[in-house]
Image (cartoon, grey):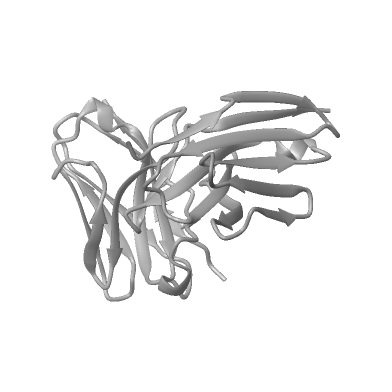
Amino acid sequence: DAGVTQSPTHLIKTRGQQVTLRCSPKSGHDTVSWYQQALGQGPQFIFQYYEEEERQRGNFPDRFSGHQFPNYSSELNVNALLLGDSALYLCASSFPSTDEKLFFGSGTQLSVL
Amino acid sequence: GENVEQHPSTLSVQEGDSAVIKCTYSDSASNYFPWYKQELGKGPQLIIDIRSNVGEKKDQRIAVTLNKTAKHFSLHITETQPEDSAVYFCAATYNNNDMRFGAGTRLTVKP
């Protein structure tokens, strides 16, 4: 049973560029949440996707956007990258009936130079 | 505000000793309080969770206690082993789907 998979594992970008991160949820899960984890801190909620729509959003600017596909996989897009966007980006999946139990992928380490 | 505070930030114990990590939450948190373990290079892994209709939950060497009146919950690890060394996060859910995490506790178990 495949867990949550994310790609790429590492990424280096320069300020002003755009980036797309990808996530495949755990088998049987249909809800995907994205988190940003800065070094030495806990994950911070970016947004959650369910039925291909953004269901809830944390305190992140519009530069952060996402998408969910019919197969439940998801993308996180960040435009106009800032140095402060450097972080580990985590994807977590869950199933509505046990919605609150999140299963995390290993993340994408994004470095903005 | 909608915050989760976690203490201590670092904890070092001798193998076989117990470790306790504490978290507090604000009023508007929902009734679900999970604990996650994060090892180097990996994502957080759910190790135990508790709902507000329960005061304590145990799973082998790990237990979580919840004090609703004081709005705090704690993780207890007994008979610690070197493989318990990791960063531990508590969390609470706000506004249904916004899970807020504590800042983490780096636990080191010395052999």
Residue B76 placement, left or right of A103 = right
Residue A14 placement, left or right of B15 = left
Q: How many marks?
A: 0
Position of B28 relative to B82 (above/below): below
Position of B68 relative to A39 (above/below): below
Please provide percent x and percent y for residue B83. 74, 40
Please provide percent x and percent y for residue B31. 47, 56
Locate the C terminus of chain B by quadrant: top right
- Residue sitting at 58 percent across and 55 percent down? B50
- Residue sitting at 47 percent across and 53 percent down? A105
Q: Is A95 or A90 nearer to us in this picture?
A: A95
Please provide percent x and percent y for residue A34. 34, 51
- Residue sitting at 27 percent across and 57 percent down? A75
- Residue sitting at 59 percent across and 55 percent down? B49
Residue A65 placement, left or right of B41 = left
Q: Is A6 or B29 nearer to us in this picture?
A: B29
Position of A112 relative to A49 (above/below): above
Locate the N terminus of chain B by quadrant: top left
Residue A107 placement, left or right of A65 = right
**Please, which residue is most extreme toward the front here?**
B69
Please provide percent x and percent y for residue A98. 48, 69
